[in-house]
Every structure is written in C-alpha cells, then in structure tokens.
Amino acid sequence: MLHLVTNPIGVLALAKREIHRFFSVANQTIFPPLVSSALFMYIFGVAIGSRVNFSATGLTYLQFITPGLMAMHLISSSYENTSSSLFIGRWHNHIQEILLAPLSYIEMVLGLLAGGVARGILVCMGVWLISLFFTPSIIAHPIALLYFMLMVSVIFSCAGMMGALWAEDFGMLSMWNTYVIIPLALLGGVFHPLFMLPPALQIISHFNPIYYLVSGIRYSMTNVTDTPAMTCAIVALGMAGTIFLATVYLFKIGYKLRT
Amino acid sequence: MRNSELAISIKGLTKFYKDFQALDKISFEIKRGDFFAFLGPNGAGKTTTINVLTGLSNYQSGDVRVFGHDVTSEYLSSRRLIGLCAQESNFDPFLTIYQLLVYQAEYFGVTPWEAKRRANELLERFGLADKRNCKHRALSGGMKKRLLLCRALIHDPEILILDEPTSGCDLELKFLIWDYLTQLNKEGKTIFLTTHYMEEAEKLCKTIGIINNGKIVRIGDKKQILQDKSLQDVFLEITGIE
C-alpha cells in the first residue's frame, strides 16, 4: 500500500526547506518560547518556587518544572511548525510544488515532519540551556530523553499536519493548540506532581495522554516520575505510530490536498 | 520512462465535483513530441484534465497514462516526467527565486549540484538572473510568468503542461515564450498547452483538441480541423458561442 523512501534527495530537500523556513523567522519560532521559559523559571521557580515545600519529590520546584517546560515547548513548537507550514502551503497553494513531485505520501510526511522534529528538539534543548542560568542540572538519562523528544515531536508534528489539513482559516488552525493541546499539556503535570491533586483528578489525569509524555521527559531529566518510565515509553510509541500512519493516510487520499 | 509512443493516453475519464460532472468520459491521445493545444471556454474542463494528469485531482473512473505510466498506481513515475506551468503564481513566500528553483529540482531527485547549475541556467535564459536573491513578491507579473516556466522546466521533464502561460503577458514576453516553446518542441519535448488565445494555438501547435461542457467535441491534426478557416471561427462554431 505504501511506497517507502525511493527519492532520498527529494525528502532531504523538503526537510531542508522546512528547517530553512523556521530559521528564517527565528524571531517567531525559536526565541519566544525561550524568553517565556526564562520568565516562567524566574517567576515560578525562583520567586515563588523557593517558598514551596517540594521535598517529597527530592527536587526543588525549579528542577521539577524545567522538564515540564521543556515538554510543553517541545509539544507546541512541533505542532506550530508543521501546522503553519502546511496550512500556509495550502493557503498560497505552493503545496502544489510538493504534490507535483515524485515523492511518495510517506516521503511527503517525513519531509514535513523533519521541520517539526528539528524545531521541537532545538527549542526543548534551548529551554534546558536557559534553565542552567537558574539551577544546575544534568540529564539523568540522555538516551531516554532523546527517545521521548523524538516521540513527542513526531506525535505533535503529525498532529500539526492533521490540524493544517482540517483547518479552513487561521482561527481553525490555532483552535486545537489553544483549546486542546496546551490545556492538556498544562493539566498533564507541567507545573505540578500528580500527588498534589485531589484523588479524583489524579485518576482523571491518567486518561490524559500528554501526562505520560511529560512524565517521560521528567524521568529522563531527573530520574523522578509518578508513573513507570516504561509505561510512558510504550504510550509514546503507540501514539507516535498511530498518528504517523493516520497522517500518511490523509496524504494518500489527498484529504483537502487534491480536489 | 517506458518506450511508449504515446505521451498521454486518456480513456473514459470521468470526474465529478460533488454533483457537478466536470469531465464526461473523455478520451484522447497525444503522441510523443507533439505540440498539442487543448482549447475550450472557461469551465469546460481544461484545468481539471491537467489536474488529473498531474495528480492534483482525484477522478472517479477512466484510465489515464503518461508515457505508459498510470497516474494513480504509478504516480511516482508519471510525475517525474511532467513539468507543470500553472495558471497563477503559487510560490513559497519564504524562499528567494533561486532557492525556490533549487528546492524544486531536488524534490524531483536532481542532485543539489546539478539543481544549482540548472537554476542558474534557466534564470539567465529567462532574464531573471539579477533577481535571483529576490522573493517572488518583488517580481512583476511578467517575471512571475517566466519564473513559473523556469520552475516547470527545472527537472528537465519529458512533457511540459502549460495552463494559459501567456495570459497577461506583454508582446515581448509572449514572443519570448513562443520561441522557447517552439525550440523545446523541436528538441523533442511534448507540449500540452491550454490557452484562450486562438492565434497562439494556431501558430504553435500541431494538433488541437476542443473540450466543451466536459466532453471532447473535436480533436485532430491542425490542418484537418481548420480546413482553410481560422481557428477562432472553428472554435466558435464547435462550441456554439455567439
């Protein structure tokens, strides 16, 4: 059913173009999440966090929220990159440049995905570097971090492409991010551990898929987690595989791409 | 590329947009090396046919092949052979026109070195070399037309499909494009042209097809179709436009 990679030069070109695109508007794509992270770390971590008793986790509050902020910006950067690129491509109709090319549908998705993954990981690591100005931290499990960054960026890059295909205008484009992804990320433990919630909300949080992704990144960074890391890794892999195949399918049927 | 003498083969192509039938079982063939004009009033089905050929539109039934390759089941092979010069400019706003051409060539599997060489050559050929670092918004309408043509040619396609390439062009540019297309055809490229300018079709093409209301109403050798009449008279007579 699916053609695998038969045009590596084409996929690489598409990936290069996607990366070129977000670097050319770095003031909109790279620096804002770094600035907002620095502010979060200062206000919540330094000013307020120093008064929060967080000894139960074995971490300072700043050390706790840093992986949360990394996960949150990894999610939003990956999503925004592919959603804006593909939607603008549809809007200006230069998506035809890709649709006319001898790229299989899996290659089209891989090329677009590369931009989202690169931007997400770049911003995520940038947030970590910013955190070093506020608190010393070493990465507890670098390989696990790489795995979770890759999985999370694939999930939300694909979600961004699905959002861009579904949207008819810029309002619809930002709707998923504003009303679904960011709230779920915030409720998924960016700023709080699960045990701080009332028991009912703790149970509900386990149905929030983003909770496992945030937990996975926190485990990779600090070796602290509410949920076994293996559970988080399996959930992430399942989500990434499912959403990737769904995105390829939408390209194959030409959903809002072909008339 | 298969050793097919037919550049394009369409049999029983039917296409609906919801309830509207845009193409009604159209069939025709274009030989390798032909210069084919595809004429018809607005909304007749010209662009829809092009979109099906290039993979921009799905279709309900029919057999559509480019040099023997089915455009659905063998789309990777068929797309490699086509260069499309679209009706309206649709360029990536983030790229300079040079980057745009290089990326486009690479999407077709052209190596980066060769892509750069071809981009420079085409920009020079079409008088856009001094604009290579500009974005397309900085170009005039005529320059954008030239850029569309450069983009269509960047991967050296076997068949060039042109959707009204000279609409809105001044005479100088029109002649430049005509000369270039004639030269390409002499070099063996198959050319599929849609236009509303009858003199353009009459001057350039070897065969002519006329479509009206989604049906092919006349197709054949230019001399056969004209029979001492002007193309405009034949077109008006066939399409019933008064």
Image (cartoon, rainbow, N blue to C red):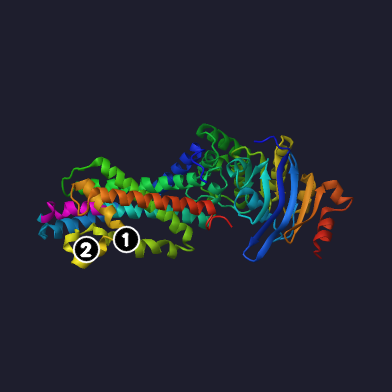
Q: Residue A83, image x and y in percent?
A: 43, 55
Q: Name the residue located 86 percent from the left edge and 46 percent from the top edge.
A: B223
Q: Is residue A185 left or right of residue B198?
A: left
Q: Which residue is mark 1?
A: A182
Circle 2 residue: A202
Q: Position of residue A19 (x, y in %)?
A: 41, 45
- Mark nearest the camera among 1 and 2 is 2
Q: Is residue A179 above or below residue B154?
A: below
The numbered disc on residue A238 is none
* Disc 2, SS: helix
Q: Does the magenta-highlighted stretch encompass residue A167?
A: no
- The image shows residue B206 at horizontal and vertical percentages of 79, 44
Measure the alpha-carbon separation of dots 1 and 2.
Answer: 19 Å
Return the residue nearer the eye: A240 or A40. A240
Q: Are marks 1 and 2 on the same chain?
A: yes
The residue range painted magenta reads A56-69
Residue type beneath disc 1: Ile
| Majority secondary structure in the magenta region | helix
Q: Secondary structure at mark 1?
A: helix
Chain on which label 2 sits? A
Q: Residue at x 22, y 42 (%)?
A: A141
Q: Residue furthest right?
A: B228
The answer for which chain carries disc 1 is A
Query: Is residue B213 rendered to the left or right of residue A125?
Result: right
Amino acid tagged 2: Gln
Query: A17 above or below A168?
Result: above
| The N terminus of chain B, quarter of image | top right
Q: Is residue B100 among the parts visible in the rendering?
A: yes
Using a 10 Å C-alpha cutoff, classify the residue at mark 2 as few (fewer than 14 neighbours), some (14 to 19) or many (20 or more): some
Circle 1 Cα neighbour tier, 10 Å, few/some/many (<14 / 14–19 / ≥20): some
Which of the 4 quarters of the picture holds residue B115? top right
